[in-house]
Structure formats: structure tokens, C-alpha cells
Amino acid sequence: MSFFDKLRTQKLLSFTLILFTLAVGVVIGTLVSTGVKAAKDNTVAPGAAPLQIPNPVQLSTQFTQISKSVEPSVVNISTTYLPKQTRQQMQPRSRRMPAPDEGDQQGMEDFFRRFFGGPEGMPDVPDRRAALGSGVVVDRTGYILTNNHVVDKADRIQVKFTGDTTEYEAKLVGVDAPTDLAVIRVEGKSGMTPARIGNSDAVQVGDWAIAIGSPFGFQATVTAGIISAKERDIDPTMQFQHFLQTDAAINPGNSGGPLLNIRGEVIGINTAIASRSGGYQGIGFALPINTAVKVYNEIIKTGKVTRGGIGVSFRPTEAPGNKELLKAYGAASGVFVQDVAPGGPGEKAGIKSGDIIVAINGQQIDNGGQLMDKVTSTPIGQTLQVTVLRDSKRQTLPVTVADLAKVFPERFGSGQGEEGAPSEGAQAKFGISIENLTAERRRNLGINKPGGVLVGEVTPGSFADDIGMLPRDLIVAINRQPVSSVDDVKRIQNTLKPGDAVAFQIMRQAGRGGDWQSTYLAGTLPNQR
């Protein structure tokens, strides 16, 4: 075989070997590819790649910082009420006295619902208990600011702090019904953190607002929104409640909790919501903290809030036709006096219905808010120079300021006296609580005759109960001595001793809206019970 023949044979073998190697590689590759494809085709989600969780990164925001700093200051408040039968054994009987226009107000009450109204809305079952609302710690010694309606009539108050499962007993320090505020205190817990107090006068519409509380019992819930309005009045009869309105989500259980600004300062106490369903609809109301602070400071000092009064009822400045009324009486501005309380400071000074108050101590008065602010902030016993316009003539009358709760007990009285007993009544001998009647209240009750005091409560088993006295009776005479005021009753009581015969002349209404009829009740005054 020649050299060239050998070379051709060797090349052929090499080429054949290469082809064989390539063929084997293709077969192996096909098998491997087919196996992988078969494995992929067997997955639940073909083509899906597993997700990866990144390392945790703190995304701190202003709201986060506020929540962390304020949550320890916000508490959950729950209360216990005695069953109805037990309560009746311990407390005076009372009959609710509905206003003549109560039916007209029912729709408003349903619309402007408070978060919780105390025990009246709960079934009478033994040891009933409910998480009523929230509160905010304002002093490291355990003083907490909340709503009066959260703790109203509670027999037991318990407080829970965020992150602490212990329920701490709290005691009531004092309340102020006109602003719906209450102060309670927790003892026995250390390390309480008070919230920082802001200035609600600095709040502007559009500012951020944060609410923290226990809506529907869910403790430490944080929501945010803005301030929607200021100086919002939702009930014309509540002359000391001018609210901040917010769309921060607040619901039943937020009541009494704080409304905060973006700095984490308390600017309001959440009080009410406007809702047709009872839940969040973007309209909530908080009492400005500046008002709450004034109330708190008086309560911790004296246990109550005392406001000045001059004994006049006035027409709201924003009432329809008020400008025309003032003009008809010869005034461009001022406050139109509708009624004057009998025996009150205004009547004694000579103020009359139809007068227009235009100035106090020389300072012009343009509306009812200015009048209320000036009078209620004046110390009891101090004299104000009240300028009125009467028959288009100005005259200034010196009026001595009295206690508003005593001038209008049915509107501004707390129902509690110095020691917690029903106010105005002297229960030591008779076992009743009583109140003076204004001219406006007389008209509402249909009482046409002057004189008399109205019975509010009758203590079960008392002398008054034994002789058949009832709530809503009008006492016009005791032992033939005319009665025109609470002071008359107290004066007569002081002359009596156990064993004396006591005769009451009373007026009693024959059903709601019926005529008032005279009757007599008498008995022998027993020893003190």
C-alpha cells in the first residue's frame, strides 16, 4: 500500500471516529434535555420562579414615631354596672323628665351619636361589663382624662394599658357634664407615661390629625386624617362644646381617647361622631384640648368646675331672623335676652326679657359666645357692669355673678353636691332632691302659677317615700309656709326635729301634658335613717 493510500485510510478512520463521537454526544444531550424538560413539566406552576424575602429594613415615618411614643399613654377603659334591682336598692328613685320637644330631637340624637351612653343602653343583667372607651394619661401619678359619658354612673372603673394585661382599678376624681369630660386616677402602677399637651388654638383646617384609642374594643388602634373644621357646634343646647371636626377614622370605643397633631401632641379629646349607622362615616368631633385643660385643672383643684352665671337665657346669634329681631328692637348687634331666671342675678339687677346686651365692663358684646365666655370666666361674687339696650336707650346695670349650676340647675347642674349626694335636696330629713324652676322650665312643664320647687328624686324607704311623694311633684308649701326656692325648703327643714308633724302641699300633673292638681301629703318625721 502506497503512502497516499495509508494517509487516506487514516483520515477516513479519524473522520468516522469524530462522527461517532458527535453522534454519541447528541444522543446524551437529547436524553439529558428530555429529562430536565420532563422534570419541569411535572411542577404545579410551570415556568414560575420561587419568590425571595428581602432582609428586613425599617421604613420609619412620622406616623410610626407618633404611634410608638403615644401608645403607652392611651388606655382602654371598661366599667361595671350594678343590675337595675340592686341599683334601685342603693340609690334614690328618679323619673326621667322628657322635654316637650323630645320627639323632635330624637332624629338629631340618632344622627349625632355619642360613642357609648353609659348603662342606659345596656341590658340589666348582673355584673354587666363593657369596654366603653378610651382615655389618655396626662400625669405620671396616674391621672387620666376621658369623657364623662364613658364612666357615667359606673360602679366600677378598670383601666388597661398597652402591652399590659393587668386591669387596674381607677377612681373617679371629678366630672364636668357641660363639656362631657371626666378625670379618673389609677394607683398601683409604676412607670406611667403622660402624653404631651398641645395648643388647639394653633390648629388649622387641613392639618394632619391622628386618633389613637380602642374602637369596638380593639386596643391601641391608630388612624389618621386631617382637621376638617374648627368651632363646630353639633348641639345648640351644649354651649360649652365647640368641636374640632376630623375625618380621621374614629368609632365607638375611641371616645375619650386623644386626637393628636403631627408632632404627637394632644390637641383634642375624641367625643362624638356623626353617623347614621353608628360607625365611621368620615365625621368625628373632638373637644379642643385648651378647653379640656381648663376643665382638668379645676377638677384636680376642687373636684368640680364652677362657672359664673347672670341668670339670662338668650337667643342664638345665628338663629334665623336674629338680625331682623335686633334691628326691630333698635340694635345693629348684641345679644337678645329671651328669659330672665326668677330670683337670679339678672332679675335682681333689673335685666328684663327683650333687653339687648351690648357691652360688659365697657367691652362690646356682639354674640352669645362672647357673652358666655365673659360671664362664665368671671369669679363668683364679682360684679359686672352690663350695658343693655332697652327702648333704643342704653343703660348700664351692675350684676353680681352667681354659680351657673345654681342659677340653672336643670341645665348646668351636675346632679352631685359636695359629698356626692344629689344636689339641691336635703335628704337628711325628707329624702328628696329638688330644684328651682326657671320661667322657661315652667312653660315647658305647663306650670302657670309662680312659686314651688320641683322634686327630682325620692330615696326609697325615706320619709318622703313613705308619705307617697313622687318625682316631678311640685312642692308649693310645707306646714303652711309657702315654698318658692330650694333655700325655703332648707330653712323649713332646719326648724324640724324627729317626731314633728310635716304637711306638704304639692301640685301633681295628671299624666304628661295634663293639668296640675293640688294635693296634700303628711306624716310624722322619724328619727334619722
Image: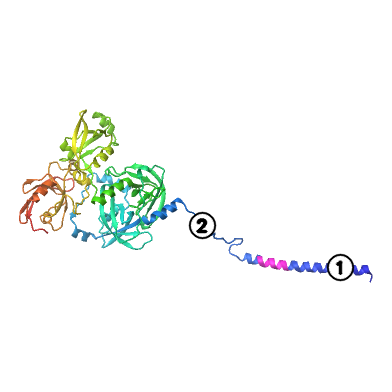
Disc marking residue 369:
none
The answer to whether residue 63 is magenta is no
The answer to whether residue 31 is magenta is yes
Quadrant containing the N terminus is bottom right
Q: How many marks?
A: 2
The kind of secondary structure element at disc 2 is: loop
Which residue position holds label 1?
Answer: 12
Q: Nearer the viewer, residue 203 or 393?
A: 203
Q: Residue 386 location, x and y as percent?
A: 21, 35
Mark 2 near mark 1, Cβ–Cβ under 8 Å?
A: no
Q: Residue 106 location, x and y as percent?
A: 28, 47
The stretch of residues the image draws in magenta is 28-36
Label 1 neighbourhood size at 10 Å, few (<14), some (14-19), many (20+)? Answer: few
Residue 125 occupies quadrant: bottom left
Residue 78 occupies quadrant: bottom left
Secondary structure that dominates the magenta span: helix
* Lateral position of residue 276 relative to residue 29, left or right: left
